[in-house]
Each structure stands twice: as C-alpha cells, then as structure tokens.
Image: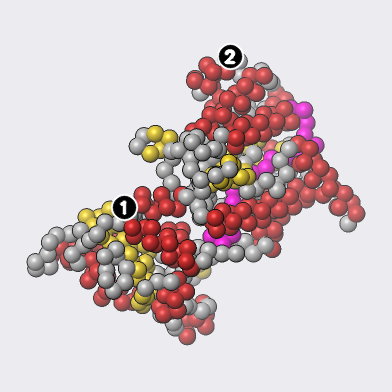
Amino acid sequence: MSIGKREYARRRARLIAGLPQGSLAVVPAAREQLRSRDTYFPFRQDSDFLYLTGFAEPEALLVLVPDRAQGRELLFCRERNADKELWDGPRLGPERAAEQCGLCDAFPISDLDDILPGLLEGRTRVYYTFGRYPQLDRRLQRYLHTIGQAPGSVGVPELVDLDRQLHDLRLIKSAQEVRLMQSAAEITAEAHCRAMRRCCAGLYEFQLEAEILHTFVGAGARQPAYPTIVGGGTNALVMHYCSNNAVLKNGDLVLVDAGCEHRGYTADVTRTYPVNGRFSGEQKALYEIVLAGQAAAIDKVRLGAHWDHPHMASVEVITRGLVDLGLLRGDVSGLIEAGAYRRFYMHRTGHWLGMDVHDVGDYRVHGQWRQLEPGMVMTVEPGIYIAADDDQVPERYRGIGIRVEDDVALMKSGPLVLSSAAPKTVAEIEYTMRQGAVQEELW
C-alpha cells in the first residue's frame, strides 16, 4: 500500500491552481546529513518534496511554473552514474524519475545553473521557503540578483513563502493517506503490546525501547518517527526524556511514547503502565482521570468544533478529577480560568499528525481557532505529572507521571481512533502484562 502516481499529480495540480499567473514555485529535496567524518545519517526525504513527488533521492529540485506552455512541472535530479551506484546504490536518473513521478520533464541537477535562471526571468513572484537549505538559499539569491542587474530587467521577483499554500494542502489527508497512517498506528500499537508483555522490574529503559524498535523493523518501518521515550518513575515527568538508561523499578509506572514511520507517514502513541503489571490505588486513580480526560477530548473531535474544543474538554475533566482527589482545591471553573491545572497538566492536548510527527498546518486562522474538517489527523494526549518534591501534595501521589496518547482521524462520521489496538484501560493493560508474564514462565 502506497500513494499512487495519480495522487501525486493531483497534489501538484492543486498547488499550481493556487499560484498566480507569472509566478514560479521551487521545492527542494532534503540534503544528506553528515553524522561523523565520512558517515551519514540514514537519508530521510523532505516532507514537502516527498508530498509532491514521491521521489526519495537527495540532490533534487521540483520547479512548478503555472503558465509554462511546454510543461508546468520540472524535476532536477542526479544522473545515473555506474561508479557512484556501485557504492551507494541505484539512481533513477532524470528520464526514469520523470516517468515514475508522472512529471512533464526532468533534467540533470548539474544543469540547474543553465536552466533555472531562464525560468525565473520575467516572473513576478517566486514561491520558496527560505531558511531550510542555506546553500540553495544563496544560490537562488544569486540567480535573482543576476536577473535584476540584467539590461532591460523588470526587476527582481517578489519572494513569497510557499508554506501557507502547500501546508494547507498537507493538512487535509486523502483516503490513501489515512490508510497509511492507520497502518503506521497498527504497527505502533503492536510495538506497545510487545513492550507491555516484556516489561518487568530490573530491565533497563533501553531494553524496553529495543522491544519497540524490534517490532518497527520487523514490520518494515525501519525508522521511528521520533526518538522513543521510555521514562520509568520520575523520568516520566520529563516531557521529552529520551536518555532511556535507567533501571525500571518495582512499584513504579513507566511512560512509553513511541511511534513508527511507515511509507512516509507517522504514528505517535503513548501508553503508561505499571512496571510490575499491577496499578496501585493512587496510580489507578490518577490514570483513570487521564483516561476520562482523553475520552472527553476525543468526543470533541467533531465537524464544526474548533481546535481548542478537545483541549478544553480534557482540561475540565482533569481539573474536576484533581479536585475530587484533593490535589486541587476550589471551584472547577475558577481553577480552569486561573490556569491552576497547569501545575499538573502543562501541555496542550494534541498536535497535527501526518508526514511529520508534529505536522504542518496552522492552529489559528485570522486569530481564531481553526475549525476541524474531515481529513484532519491529530493526536489526543492529556496527562498528569506530579513533581517528586511537591510538598503540597500527599506523598503517595508524588513522582507520578501519566500520559495517554492516541492518533485520531476526523472522518465525516466522526472521530476514528487509528491506534485503538494498543491496550489502554486498566483491565486491558493488566491483562496484556499478565499474558506476557505467563509466556515468560512457559519459556
């Protein structure tokens, strides 16, 4: 299952339709990134470029020219090179790349200096995202300066950020995209199940991480969407903890935030569970509040709602739950208005999800919260975090960090939880962990 050539063509056509006549758009591929000396990180294509082309090689550039008679879509990429391919693997080359991507034409990237300046001449606007690839920024500025200095020049084209037009397109997922994200979420859910089954006191956090990565790679999702978080005990209180080098202790909770990337699309799922397989009374009480807050938030992922509705639904449930436990004191609405809950719940309830784990798309439009539409995919991830040194809280609650996160697609019929296969209720988690313990005994 993957995105088809026709869908890539539709994406480019929609972007071109939003560009004015006399303009031109430049979309670069990612560059290979040096890791150390002559060793490079695994290559990951730029999401904008991948969204428009499906082309997975570095050293490439897409140029879109709305009113060009000879062809509106041009790709620049590496030529075939037997010596290079012997060491680094096959290249498509311009002709095969144009055919595979369904593009009008393709040229060697080495011809960019000869072709792109001519395409820029006479243009009134150039759509391009500056600051992402400095070397190309300087190259493009040099082209534009030369055009502006040429005899008879009508001036330098206006530079316009491409992000707004392109990212609004990326925000609304197609049916094919939702299916790919469903696959990524299912692989991720199985990874969380494996980690639950293998979890026990005495393991290092990185050993639980290894169980997650084992499932990802075994399913063909060779790269995690982001560094895996395995935070046992008070490490769960660090939002982006990723050292993963502590020992998991009996009686503690462990927070596991992990998601794979599958065919260019990401998952982002968090589960929190007891290292020994049984929630204590205090852990269960807090966990049930977070779970209820998440359920309330997911219920607000509806047509006509706006971005802030799920967050405020979770805030109300969590604040009320903290009052019921005596961790907050006062009127619920007053505590929410004063932001008192932020002492225990300091982040928002979610973010856009797609080709990037924190995907593109504005949360506000013209100063107002964005209205939710079919095809939007988001995380829903409330939490409660109680500092280990918070002496205003009974000691039995201190040092507990809990987050529950799922991936939710908004369909015409309502919210679809893509990651629902990952155990989430107290009963489901404890059952899954017991099954793991039984298997270990049999082994």
- Which residues fall within the magenta stretch? 262-282
Q: Residue at x 35, y 71 (%)?
A: 74
Which residue in the structure is indicated by mark 1?
161
The reply to whether the magenta stretch includes residue 274 is yes
Quadrant (top left, top right, bottom left, bottom right) of the C terminus: bottom right
Counting from the top left corner in percent of width and height, residue 343 is at 56, 26
Q: Amino acid at mark 2?
A: Gly
Q: Is residue 189 above or below residue 44?
A: above
Counting from the top left corner in percent of width and height, residue 367 is at 36, 34
Counting from the top left corner in percent of width and height, residue 104 is at 37, 73
Residue neighbourhood size for the residue with mark 1, other residues' Cα within 10 Å, grouped as few (<14), some (14–19), many (≥20)? few
- Residue 358 horizontal side relative to residue 179, left or right: left
Q: Quadrant of residue 52?
A: bottom left
Which residue in the structure is indicated by mark 2?
330
Disc 1 to disc 2, C-alpha distance: 48 Å
Q: Residue furthest right?
A: 442
Q: Amino acid at mark 1?
A: Asp
